[in-house]
Amino acid sequence: ITLNCNGIRSAAGKGFFEWLAGQQADIVCLQETKSQEHQRGREFRPQGWHCHYVDAVRPGYSGVAILSKREPDAVVTALGAGFEDMDAEGRYLEARFGALSVVSLYLPSGSSGELRQQVKYSFMDRFAGHLAGLRARGGEALVCGDWNIAHRPADLRNWKSNQKNSGFLPEERAWLDRLYGEAGWIDVWRRLYPEDGEACYTWWSNRGQAWAKNVGWRLDYHVACPGFAGRAQAGSVYKAARFSDHAPVTIDYAD
């Protein structure tokens, strides 16, 4: 499961952990936890889960987490050299289970203005190299999270009017083209459901009754290397209850 929870304390108050208890999930990737360690009590480390959090230096901002039923063999809490700015924002967490690496990713948004859009582009350029390193290491890899890019017109309702807006800019979409093309990564949802219309949306603006009218975007992805992507069996976007302005995306993978 992956979910941008738009504040884990807020999501908890809306019943996220009660819902999670009934999901039989093995691994949960969370983004935008927007909390510090001292603000998270026992409910944020539920019994039966191994919980790892990476917080932003700035309080109430960004942050990622991975909850897993199996204890990871190793946990990587930063991208490291060359990513100091993004590591300070708490955007990357990797848990390794044998030959499988699972990443919780919160890719920056550029919607607040040109300066942040340039930060987003900078991260994308650098992160492409990191992803290549993940592939080169061998084994399997799965990167779950809020990528803050809708790839194709099928991934958002009003694609024509958003072509000049962050999240659907030609440069962003071309970057995903390269990721899914020459770099060899797989958009798992699209592997399962090439043409699923509006069922794929995972985020809705808080403006203009976007949720009620299902004026959504698909921003939350499972992105996997080909071997692991081939194990995907079924997926779902949970919309019966709202824990956030995003919805949880669940993919079932064969053992």
Image: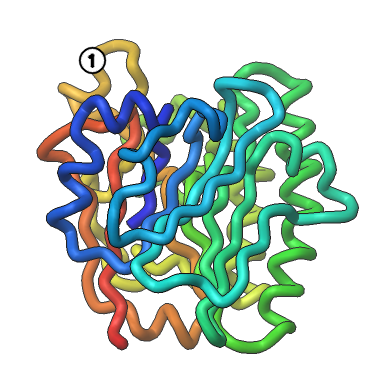
Q: Residue at x 59, y 87 (%)?
A: 139
Q: Residue at x 89, y 54 (%)?
A: 81
In the displayed structure, 223 sits above or below 136; it is above
Q: Residue at x 51, y 72 (%)?
A: 72
Quarter where residue 127 is shown: bottom right
Front residue of this view, candidates 245 and 19: 19
Quarter where residue 156 is shown: top left
Q: Percent position (x, y) of residue 161?
A: 45, 25
What secondary structure is found at the residue carrying circle 1? loop
Type of amino acid under label 1: Gln
Query: On the rendered structure, is 160 left or right of 209?
Result: right
Query: On the rendered structure, is 127 left or right of 92?
Result: right
Front residue of this view, candidates 141 and 213: 141
Which color scheme is applied? rainbow
> From where the camera sits, is residue 190 visible?
no
Quadrant showing the C terminus: bottom left
Q: Residues within 10 Å of mark 1 (few under 14, many from 20)?
A: few
Image label count:
1
Quarter where residue 171 is shown: top right
Q: Percent position (x, y) of residue 105?
A: 56, 51
Q: Residue at x 18, y 24 (%)?
A: 213
> From where the camera sits, is residue 235 visible?
yes
Determine which residue is flagged by label 1: 209
Query: On the rendered structure, is 50 left or right of 192?
Result: right
Front residue of this view, candidates 118 and 18: 18
Q: Percent position (x, y) of residue 185?
A: 56, 73
In the displayed structure, 94 sits above or below 8; it is below
Q: Percent position (x, y) of residue 75?
A: 61, 65
Quadrant showing the N terminus: bottom left
Q: Residue furthest top?
A: 208
